[in-house]
Amino acid sequence: MNDITFDDSGMEEFQDMLGSYLSKVDEKNALDAIEEGAKEFVNDLLRLPKPRRKVTAPGYTHLVDSFSYKRDKTGIDVGWGKYYGPMLEHGTKKMSAKAHLKPLFEQNKERYYKKMITALDL
């Protein structure tokens, strides 16, 4: 009745590989690597096409031009410089979502991951 078996072949090699990664990576190196991926992501966001707008007032900054990242002690945030960016990304009660961040990240995430792994020098 108890025919469940567990094949643990390869687990020791996997554990050794994780141990070697942990010995090379500390918190600062990990944040540096994530920052490299965030820079690449923000560069891609800044290249998104800008819909034509009639707003030409002096000092006006288009939402696409406001993408940036911020690093602090605990992590890196990527987002907008405009207060309405999250409303546009996620939608509101009165407006459907018009996402920018998530689709672009999903489309290029492998490239960002490779950039981070290269920065870690693993």
Image: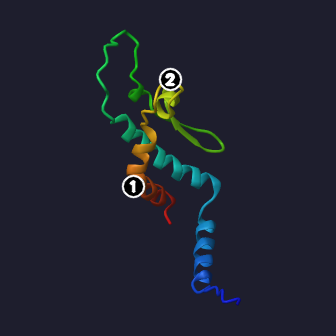
- The answer to whether residue 40 shows anywhere in this view is no
- For label 2, count other residues whose C-alpha is less than 10 Å away and answer few (under 14), some (14-19) or many (20+): few
**Camera-side residue: 52 or 33?**
52
Disc 1 element: helix
Residue 57 image label:
none
**Camera-side residue: 88 or 40?**
88
The disc labelled 2 sits on which kind of residue? Lys
Residue 9 location, quadrant: bottom right
Give the residue at x 60% y 61%.
25
- Give the residue number, with chain letter if any, for mark 1: 111
Asked whether, in this view, residue 78 is left or right of residue 62, the answer is right
Disc 2 element: loop
- Give the residue number, with chain letter if any, for mark 2: 94
Q: Position of residue 38 (x, y in %)?
A: 48, 45
4 over 122 or under it: above or below: below
Give the residue at x 31% y 26%.
51
Disc 2 to disc 1, C-alpha distance: 35 Å
